């Protein structure tokens, strides 16, 4: 008598389209990732090209100016080359905003460590970071804006000179509601031109930069006096050398 082979119990049935579906999803995910990489690369190249262009071409307007225009009439603004801005104004802004401007590569690590150690809420943004924010981004605080600013800062430092960074900053910074750039600031607050600003006027203008919508320049303050002292110190110890050649001071100081 022949023995019958025992019947095998089949595994759980696999849907006929399961394997293709898994393979299809993997292929789709790879295509999406590849597309995102290409998009990120193209966006990075566009930003790199724009930063490189602005090393020589003056930005005509910024997003901050366009948004501010909705609430305040903009004061007349004119681009001023760094050589036509009083050296004391240049030093005052550096003393007020970024005393180690000539010593860092975009991030002042010593100031960042001080802020972290103290637990203070004050910022440690450099002039380069503020230039990145003012020229390419927006003012409202967010992690997205800070991340973009952090990525732009070393690119600007690599492609622009320190003189160019300071020149652009002085021409786009807000010195009062609707008052953008040192030309508008000198005319609006003191009825003069950037090359004729005195040490006192320069210190008072620099003092309003952290809060341009609320601070005033009509009287001396503890901060403006400290800025004037800091500007003199920066000149003496050589921390202005990266943006200001040593030599005779033009009119205005």
Image (cartoon, rainbow, N blue to C red):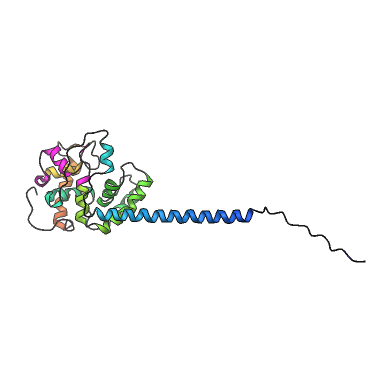
> In the rendered view, would you say 160 is above or below 226?
below
Labels in figure, total: 0
Residue sitting at the far right = 1
Q: Which quadrant holds residue 153?
A: bottom left
> In the rendered view, would you say 239 is above or below 188?
below
Q: Is residue 58 visible?
A: yes
Q: Is residue 235 magenta?
A: no
Nearer to us in this view, 220 or 2: 2
Question: Which residue: 60% across, 53% down?
Answer: 21
Q: Position of residue 43 (x, y in %)?
A: 36, 53
Q: Which quadrant holds residue 213?
A: top left
Nearer to us in this view, 115 or 74: 74
Q: Is residue 104 visible?
A: no
Question: Which residue: 35% across, 55% down?
Answer: 44
> In the rendered view, would you say 188 is above or below 91?
above
Q: For this view, does 53 lie left or right of residue 39?
A: left
> In the rendered view, would you say 127 is above or below 213?
below
Residue sitting at the far bottom = 1
Q: Which residues are magenta?
A: 171-199
Quadrant of the frame with the N terminus: bottom right
Q: For this view, does 89 lie left or right of residue 105?
A: left
Q: Position of residue 103 (x, y in %)?
A: 23, 58
Question: Which residue: 26% across, 49% down?
Answer: 131
Q: Position of residue 65 (x, y in %)?
A: 25, 40
Q: Is residue 190 magenta?
A: yes
Q: For this view, does 45 lie left or right of residue 78?
A: right
């Amino acid at each position: 008598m022949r023995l019958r082979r025992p019947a095998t119990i089949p595994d759980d049935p696999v849907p006929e389209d399961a394997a293709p579906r898994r393979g299809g999803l993997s292929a789709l995910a790879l295509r999406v990732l590849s597309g995102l990489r290409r998009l990120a690369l193209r966006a990075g190249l566009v930003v790199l090209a724009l930063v490189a262009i602005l090393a020589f071409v003056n930005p005509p307007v910024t997003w901050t100016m366009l948004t501010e225009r909705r609430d305040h009439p903009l004061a007349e603004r004119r681009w001023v080359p760094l050589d036509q801005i009083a050296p004391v104004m240049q030093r005052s802004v550096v003393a007020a905003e970024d005393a180690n401007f000539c010593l860092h590569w975009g991030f002042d690590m010593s100031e960042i460590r001080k802020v972290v150690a103290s637990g203070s809420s004050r910022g440690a943004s450099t002039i380069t970071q503020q230039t990145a924010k003012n020229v390419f981004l927006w003012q409202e605080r967010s992690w997205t804006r800070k991340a973009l600013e952090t990525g732009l800062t070393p690119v600007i430092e690599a492609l622009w000179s320190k003189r160019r960074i300071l020149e652009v900053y002085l021409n786009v910074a807000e010195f009062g509601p609707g008052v953008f750039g040192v030309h508008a600031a000198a005319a609006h607050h003191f009825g003069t031109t950037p090359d004729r600003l005195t040490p006192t006027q320069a210190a008072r203008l620099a003092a309003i930069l952290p809060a341009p919508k609320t601070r005033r320049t009509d009287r001396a303050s503890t901060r403006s006096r400290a800025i004037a002292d800091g500007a003199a110190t920066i000149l003496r110890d050589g921390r202005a050398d990266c943006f200001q050649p040593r030599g005779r001071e033009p009119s205005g100081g």
